[in-house]
């Protein structure tokens, strides 16, 4: 494969990971969580992260046996040539559909709130073209840009939430247990997709200096994004209360009411610019990782040349749903319900395969020598 290990610093990697996962708080995720567990929606990101911690921990522990190797190598090494091929192909297909409907969701947000008269296919084409260009430049460039903007993204996100929740009511989180503790745990197990991107990020292991740096960066980002999504959902609960379930995109609905007096009204455009830059980085990273997976599966050395073609395919898939409601309620929700449990199961299977094959014992004997 055409890789350049050691060129992605831990700061750049953490920035990519945070942007890939934390932006879910600016989509319809808080509304989806509210519809599942009502006022206890803010607990779900923390609980689902706790549940996904076990398979992710075991996956990273298994990958530590193969220094500098990525997820696809690990799957083919432990599951064999043929089973490994189909598992890798499944990962590529499901993430491709996920990429298509995620990017379509962002296009619908842009059209609904900022460019209502521009056709969807025009906005979608521009989004995918910019992301394809960014991905084609390489993951190192994506990481550098991510590191440059991550501070401003986080700061602007919480400033926007702070300004938009001036009239919020803390009683919006009551009753605090929502439909009940058992139901909260049950719905948390169905929300593992919130952390599923960390599974895909294991494709970037060869681009960091060591597995230790990768593990450290992963846990830093894992903790930060879990807290960020939880806090954002909590603030949306205080702002919108029971109406949160009927609001498609709470973050963008909230920032429309931000103003700094009569002289500077409607400053949401500032937050939109920062948000759209973050979205470009997120989908550029997704495109690069998907191209990397495809290149490994089919032994394509210069996989970067596949990126424009993949972007075009994702555009064609994403444009199939006719309405934003169809995207959210049918296509995207179906993919999300598959991704989380599937990635968790694959992680556990890989750890179990390594254990049964004696890879851990072999590694301990090697270290003992």
Image (cartoon, helix red, strand yellow):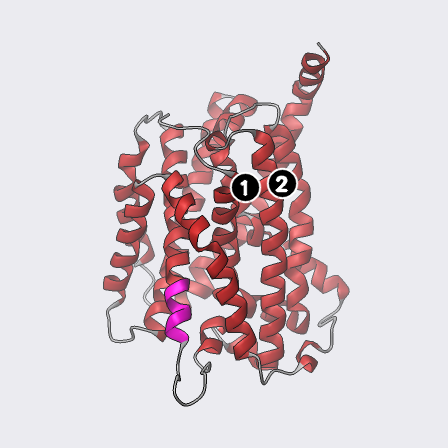
The secondary structure making up most of the magenta span is: helix
Image quadrant holding the N terminus, namely top left
Q: In the picture shown, does residue 269 fall above or below 182? A: below
Residue 98 appears in the rendering: no
* Residues drawn in magenta: 268-274
Splitting the image into 4 quarters, where does residue 217 fall? Answer: top right
Residue closest to the eye, 228 or 74: 228
Question: Image quadrant for the C terminus?
Answer: top right
First in sequence, mark 2 or 1: give its number.
2
Instruction: Please give the name of the residue rendered at 47% of the width and 43% of the height, measured from the top-left corner.
Output: 12
Q: Quadrant of residue 310?
A: top left
Q: Which residue is mark 2?
A: 56
Which residue is under mark 1?
Answer: 199
Query: Local crowd at mark 1 within 10 Å, few (<14), some, or many (≥20)?
Result: some
Using the image as rendered, state which of residue 94 and residue 242 is in the foreground: 242
Residues at marks 2 and 1 touching, judged by CB atoms closer than 8 Å: yes
């Amino acid at each position: 494969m055409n890789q350049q290990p050691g060129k992605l610093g831990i700061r750049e990697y953490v920035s990519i990971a945070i942007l890939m996962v934390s932006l879910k708080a600016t989509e319809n995720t808080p509304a989806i969580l509210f519809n599942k567990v009502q006022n206890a929606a803010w607990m779900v990101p923390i609980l689902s992260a706790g549940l996904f911690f076990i398979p992710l921990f075991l996956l990273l522990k298994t990958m530590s046996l193969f220094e500098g190797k990525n997820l696809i190598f690990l799957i083919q090494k432990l599951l064999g040539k043929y089973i490994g091929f189909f598992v890798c192909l499944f990962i590529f297909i499901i993430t491709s559909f996920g990429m298509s409907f995620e990017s379509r969701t962002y296009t619908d947000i842009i059209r609904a709130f900022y460019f209502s008269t521009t056709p969807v296919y025009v906005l979608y084409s521009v989004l995918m073209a910019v992301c394809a260009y960014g991905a084609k430049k390489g993951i190192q460039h994506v990481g550098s840009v991510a590191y440059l903007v991550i501070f401003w993204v986080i700061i602007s996100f919480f400033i926007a939430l702070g300004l938009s929740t001036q009239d919020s009511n803390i009683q919006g989180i009551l009753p605090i247990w929502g439909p009940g503790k058992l139901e909260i745990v049950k719905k948390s197990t169905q929300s593992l997709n919130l952390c599923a991107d960390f599974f895909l990020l294991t494709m970037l292991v060869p681009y960091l200096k060591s597995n230790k740096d990768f593990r450290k960066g992963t846990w830093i980002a894992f903790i930060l994004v879990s807290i960020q999504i939880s806090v954002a959902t909590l603030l949306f609960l205080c702002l919108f209360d029971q109406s949160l379930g009927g609001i498609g995109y709470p973050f963008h609905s909230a920032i429309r009411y931000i103003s700094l007096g009569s002289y500077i009204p409607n400053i949401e455009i500032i937050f939109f610019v920062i948000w759209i830059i973050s979205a470009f980085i997120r989908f550029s990273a997704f495109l690069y990782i998907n191209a990397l997976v495809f290149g490994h599966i089919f032994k394509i050395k210069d996989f970067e040349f596949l990126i424009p073609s993949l972007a075009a395919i994702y555009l064609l898939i994403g444009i199939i749903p006719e309405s934003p409601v169809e995207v959210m309620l049918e296509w995207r929700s179906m993919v999300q319900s598959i991704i989380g449990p599937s990635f968790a199961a694959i992680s556990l299977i890989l750890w179990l395969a390594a254990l049964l094959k004696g890879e851990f014992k072999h590694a301990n004997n090697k270290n003992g020598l």
